[in-house]
Image: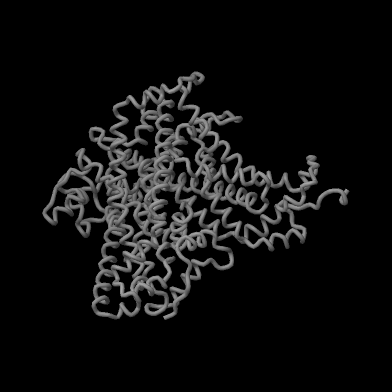
Amino acid sequence: MSVIDPPVDGAPASTGSKAPRRRRSPLTWVRGGGLSTLIFLLPMLIAFGVFSWFPIVRALVMSVQETNLVTAPTWVGVENFRTVLADPDLWTAVKNTGYFALLALIFGYPIPLALAVVMSEVKRWRGIYTALAYLPVVVPPVVSVLLWRFFYDGSETGVFNTIVGWVGLGPYPWLQSATTAMPSLVLEATWAAAGGTVIIYLAALTGVAPELYDAAEVDGASIWQKVWHVTLPQLRGVLLITLILQVIGTAQVFLEPYLFTGGGPANATLTVLLLIYNYAFGSSLGGDFGSATALSVMLAVTLGILSAVYFRLTRSWSTS
Amino acid sequence: MTVTAQPSTPEVEAEVAVSGPERPSWRRRLIRRRSSGSDGGERGIISPFERRRPGVKYPLKASTIGLLIILLIIGLGPILWLAKGAITPTQDTLRQPMALWPNGMEWSTLSTAWNREHLDQYFLNTVFVAAGSWASQLFVAATGGYALSVLRPKYGPILTGLVVGTLLVPTVVLLVPLYLTVLNPPLWHHSMLNSYWALWLPAAANPFNVVLVKRFFDNLPREVFEAARVDGAGPFRLFWSIVLPLSKPILGVVSVFAVIAAWKDFLWPLLVITDPQKQPLSVRLPVLADLIELDVLLAALFISTIIPIVLFLVFQRLFLRSAGLSGAVKG
């Protein structure tokens, strides 16, 4: 037996040389390690199969079906998409989500970069700086929202109103007014997330070759010129990726509008994900799962197109 | 001035992401930085020569201190305020929220929150949820990464592609179909609503973990595996006695990600755990916020925050390394 069978080898890595051996009985498969490999893959296959691949396919199917929890789903074609697109709330939600993403970029993109660049020049007690910057990220998001909701108290003795009162400003209505609600949400979201971005930039900054700074100094570059002409170009790859990741993340914002304002006042903070949630789970009459998945699929496709275009544009930009 | 050659950005990221078991490069860099002291050693944007010029030295010092003050206010301020608010009577907090020292302290709020509002129960629930998703994520990522990277079946690349592909799908797509799947799982057909399995199992399907672990395993020295096989170790023995002991650093990173994500998650547990007795802190706190008095609420918020903060301070290096990694790998 042992003369005929191929050597028991866990990894059939050398594929080409074994081409003539095409005798694939179950026994040789087991002896070749096929079964044990499958046993090791099984947890991953089950987890991804049931809770990732299956739901993704199901999302596509459900978006063209009418689904409720009582009767069997029926085919409705593009009806779900038509319903969603006809919903006046959709355009409010899209506008609000875009506004949130824009504000989050304005608040949250340059600040961590500036912090990281200055922090990378701190020589003593760097650990304290990084720990302080990262601390808000560690606070559970629900806790930060509930805490900030109290900070945002619109009365004169609210925490933030007391603080801005010291310099003679306010009191502001913060969450209670349609114009200030969204910036208030973004402010909290930026506070909660900026630390993570700072750490990513710090890691990238340690990768900038010191020789480049030496060379720049030989050419007589000042500190600002070194930051502008050496540091930032060297961080370009990371900067491009954090930008698109931030856009994708903010396009799916849910926690802040849900807990701070519930979408109000007057739908001023209704976001796309909150609308999806309302479609599927917001009504006591039973969810409109079809519309919810149709909107999720549309959001996902939009984000996919956006990132594809973004990477194409930035690639041509970085090579030119 | 000892200038050490370092590769440029993308390579460093890749290197950090896949750092081998013997002594990862980030640690080497860290040690070098530690030992290099305040002057000389590794340089950044500002050269040691420039640092000595008064026109640079004093503004630099000022901005360093200024940055520290800003970070103290922004990073630590709200948490300190929360700690103060937790032991301040409601009326004081409402009337003078920014008073430096409370008029009277009431430590009883902490025990009220813990006992009367059953924070202990929700807290235990959260710990239970986090422990379960930690175990399931580690199990799936380690076995899957091992099979794809070390055992390498012929269909491996296709599976890897399918796993990586899910990284591109935004989580929002999964929300509703995953909910319906949990209500009525295929083949099994028993609702997992109000069961922690509804949190643990979907958490295990995390492509990020699998990619991270696979990349790490890819960089383990293959000679060790061959030697073990020659010595007669089967795939299970190889996994348990060789690969797992070598992969502690990456499993530590996956653990941090798993525990943090479980502790933070809100929307998914809100949907699938509807029984208040079983809900974790994150789902329960917003409900309590509308029901209980302010001082007890702030005490509850403080209790929910202090554990993650203590964990962070203890495992600071692991946390920060994981955070740095998340940028490198996603990119």
- Residue A253 or residue B261, whichever sits in front: A253
Q: Where does residue A93 sit, x and y in percent of width and height?
A: 31, 34
- Viewed as shown, does residue A59 lie left or right of B20? left
**Residue beneath the point at 50% across and 68% down:** B27
Q: How is the image coloured?
A: one colour
Q: Residue at x 29, y 53 (%)?
A: B82
Report whether residue B299 is seen.
yes
Using the rendered image of the protein, determine whether residue B276 is visible from the camera's viewpoint: no
Q: Is residue A205 left or right of residue A118?
A: right
Q: Position of residue B32 (x, y in %)?
A: 47, 74
How many labels, in total? 0
Q: Which residue: 41% across, 81% down?
A: B1
Which residue of the protein is positioned furthest toward the left in this rendering? A168
Against B228, residue B303 (above or below) is: above
Identity of the residue drawn at 20% across and 40% down = A179
Left or right of residue B8: residue B156: right
Q: Position of residue B149 (x, y in %)?
A: 63, 53
Residue B111: give x, y in percent of width and height.
36, 50
Instruction: For the C terminus of chain A, give its image quadrant.
Output: bottom left
Q: Nearer the viewer, residue B324 or B77?
A: B324
